[in-house]
Amino acid sequence: MIELLPDEMARVSLDGVVMNASVALVEDVAIGDYVVLHVGFALAKIAEDEALRTLALLREAALLGAGA
Amino acid sequence: MKHVDEYRDGNLARGIARRIAVEARTERSYRFMEFCGGHTHAISRYGVEDLLPANIRMIHGPGCPVCVLPMGRVDDAIALAKRPEVTLCVYGDLMRVPGSNGSSLLKAKAAGADIRMVYSTLDAIKIAENEPARQLVFFAIGFETTTPPTAMAVRLAQKKRLTNFSIFCNHVLTPSAIQKILQAGDPDAVEIDGFIGPAHVSTIIGTTPYQRFATEFHKPVVVAGFEPLDVAQAILMLVRQVNEGRAEIENQYIRAVSAEGNRKAQAEIADIFELRESFEWRGLGEIPRSALRLREPYAQFDAERRFAIVTRPARDNPACECGAILRGSKRPQQCKLFGGACTPETPMGACMVSSEGSCAAYWAYGRFRDRETASRKAVVS
């Protein structure tokens, strides 16, 4: 999320490709947030802390796999 | 962290795969259905199945919006587009979906119908505003993911007092389809040990609506993200549930999905749409209370009422196995049209059209793999 625009719109960057999207369906979005984007609408915000927990679990499981 | 590349790490994937192989019991088999076409695509594209032990089989579900749209509704859209006053706006993957007698929106467009591909419902609203002399109809399809964007368009059209905008509503519900698969009294019905629950759909509806599949049908459901490591982790979680005799709703995609889902989007859907008594799905037949239509206060935006649309049943090409593939009882290669008469360029069935369709995924990523496997086996024997 790189810029908030009027009418519940925002400028979003997909790996550098910038486009406009609606943020009307999500609460409290801020610049710098990552969102799940679908057909021009942000559907959900991505929770950084939960993402880190998921990655930690993945690494742990992979490590267990390597040791097996 | 961009929340994409982290979930495509090949080394981690191999580690998870080894873990799955360790934990999966050799004396039994595991049949998991990924409901959503987005997962089918990820599994094919990243070769997730090749990482799994032979006794874990992924069954591809019907979660592809274009694929489950019955042919009669495609015919309706083509008839709408042929009306001289109508401009029909559609998502791009609808263009090649076969209608009756070899028709499609693409062919109707080539013959002069005013059909325009849009990326978002907001584009359709813009066209309606800019061209007040045209009757703008948005061909609304999809599961709970695309429903809120359609609701927002209706809301906007109302706010802007647009009299030339309507939607042809074909929105359908994920839980109804899962229920149908579990209840199917088909002789060729597949046995399923657990489900990978959809990613984007679940950001909207949350994980709670899946609870009854655990409680009533004793099937575990793990909601998962769309990246390959998300899918691999979800499979590991399902294997563990099956091994421990558990049937629970678990959430692997916790970075974007909550138990209650997106309340704002749910409120918009509830205000604008109501349940249809029944709706036909390609492959699954009529399913009660499985689709939405506009509520009475929004009737002026309902293309079915504005243009008095009456859907006629239409028969798919009898050789096309789309129906069985959508139910998970056949794989794309088991259809004799696959890769010959039916390719993404000239699709005979809807499963070959959309990038989310199983046949399209197998065509794009799997057709050489199977040939290699076959020739390798031939060499060995």
Image (cartoon, helix red, strand yellow):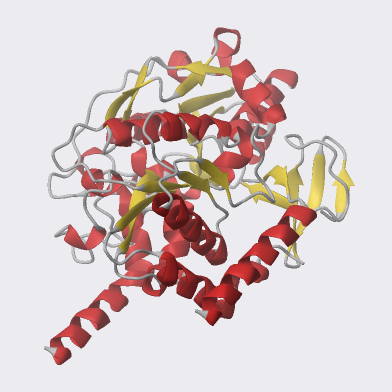
Q: Where residue B93 sits in the image (x, y, percent)?
A: 45, 50
Q: Give the side of residue B259 with respect to residue A46, left or right.
A: left
- Horizontal side of A9 relative to B13 (left or right) equals right
Q: Residue B321: percent from the left, percent from the top?
A: 19, 49
Residue found 18% across the figure and 49% down from its top? B320
Q: Which residue ends up furthest to the bottom in the rendered image?
A: B379
- Numbered disc total: 0
Q: Position of residue B71 (x, y in %)?
A: 28, 36
Decide if residue B4 is on the left or right side of residue A19: left
The answer to which image quadrant residue B216 occupies is top left
Q: Is residue A66 above or below residue B103?
A: below
Observer able to see residue A34: no
Question: Relative to the observer, which residue lies in front, B40 or B355?
Answer: B40
Res B63 seen here: yes
Apparent side of residue B354 relative to residue A37 in the rendered image (left or right): left
Q: Quadrant of the C terminus of chain B?
A: bottom left
Relative image position of residue B202 (x, y in whole percent): 57, 40
Q: Quadrant of the N terminus of chain B?
A: bottom right
Residue at the spot 76% in from the left edge and 51% down from the top edge: A47
In the rendered image, the residue lying farthest to the top is B296
Viewer-proximal residue among B114 and B68: B68
